[in-house]
Amino acid sequence: MTSQLEQDIDDLCAAARQYDARHQRIPGLTWPHGARIAVNFTADFDAMLLRRLLNEPPMQLAKGEFGGRVGIWRLIELFDSHRIKATIFTPGRICELYPRALRAVAHSGHEIADHMWEHHVPKDPALERDHLLKTAGALESIAGRRPVGTRSSHSLGLLRQEGFLYISEDSADHLPYYVRDAAGANPMLNLPFHYAIDDAMFYSFAWLGSGNAAQRITDPDRVFDLWWAAFWQQYRAGGYLNIVVHPFVSGRALRIEMMDRLITRMKTLPGVWFATCEDVARHCLAHHPVAEVV
């Protein structure tokens, strides 16, 4: 006779298998021209929107505003100086707040991708669709083309319906992979990132209302060492790295200088493919398409 504990374990294992079945790895993943690693530099251009959503105090809002007034321009200058095309994930509302900055992003040839309308996805399906379409339309008005990627929790079925090619949200693997919804349908390519390669985890004071004991203003040299180690590990293995920055965080001068050193060092090695997320997604879709579930 099966005990309750054994039944609980069986149920847990079944749920884990079901969840795992939603994720499909890409065997034998290769990059163009024999590159050893694909590197995506991505920026979440939130400005003060998330701060407003969380009803944070004026000092926090001002930090976000710095990103739109100063930080984004420094990032554009940094990427352009290295002839790197980055992907800028931005809420649709930013098109109203900082249109000149986004036009500069587009003019430099960087990818502009979806990051929700106001940094949240409504639970109501009709409102969710309205937010996604408003954002796509706003970004198209700036970039001249609709976004094909998103960093959000929009439903996969809706994203596929609207022609999106990829998401960059989950981190179930260190390489790009395909993910399906809870029903096992609507496969979508995911370009994973991890918070260990996210500037907000290292440089944020009063992050998301945290108390003094949770503060972390890390020395940029320490972040340089950590990010270089992450890059070097993936370079040796032959892999992928998605580096996430925020204009209001990494737009500070000393952090821009650190990123300049990091990119300069990366470029000393052969076989590094600096690409937009769209470039990586189109390569994976063309050369490593999703397998049908039997």
Image (tube, grey):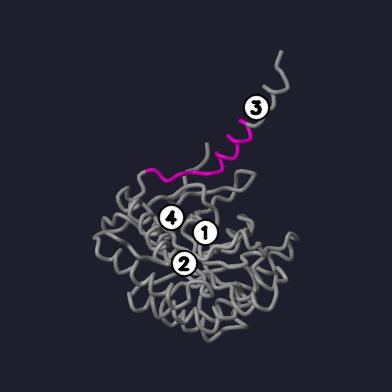
Q: CA distance from mark 4 to mark 3?
A: 37 Å
By secondary structure, the bulk of the magenta-drawn segment is best described as helix
Asked if residue 94 is among those painted magenta in the image, a careful observer would answer no
Q: Position of residue 17 (x, y in %)?
A: 58, 34
Which residue bears the numbered disc 4?
285
Question: In the rendered structure, which disc, 2 or 1, sits on the residue that comes first in sequence?
Answer: 2
* Rendered position, 76 above or below 21: below
Which residue bears the numbered disc 1?
168
Which residue bears the numbered disc 2?
42
Chain part drawn in magenta: 13-27
Q: CA distance from mark 2 to mark 3?
A: 40 Å
Q: Position of residue 204 (x, y in %)?
A: 56, 67
Describe the element under mark 4 as helix, strand or loop: helix
Q: Could you tell me the amino acid type at mark 2?
A: Thr
Q: CA distance from mark 4 to mark 1?
A: 15 Å
Question: In the rendered structure, which disc, 1 or 3, sits on the residue that comes first in sequence?
Answer: 3
Name the image quarter holding the N terminus: top right
Q: Could you tell me the amino acid type at mark 3?
A: Ile
Question: In the rendered structure, which disc, 4 or 3, sits on the residue that comes first in sequence?
Answer: 3
Which residue bears the numbered disc 3?
9
The reply to whether discs 2 and 4 touch (Cβ–Cβ < 8 Å) is no
Foreground label between 4 and 1: 1
Furthest-front residue in this view: 213
Foreground label between 4 and 3: 3
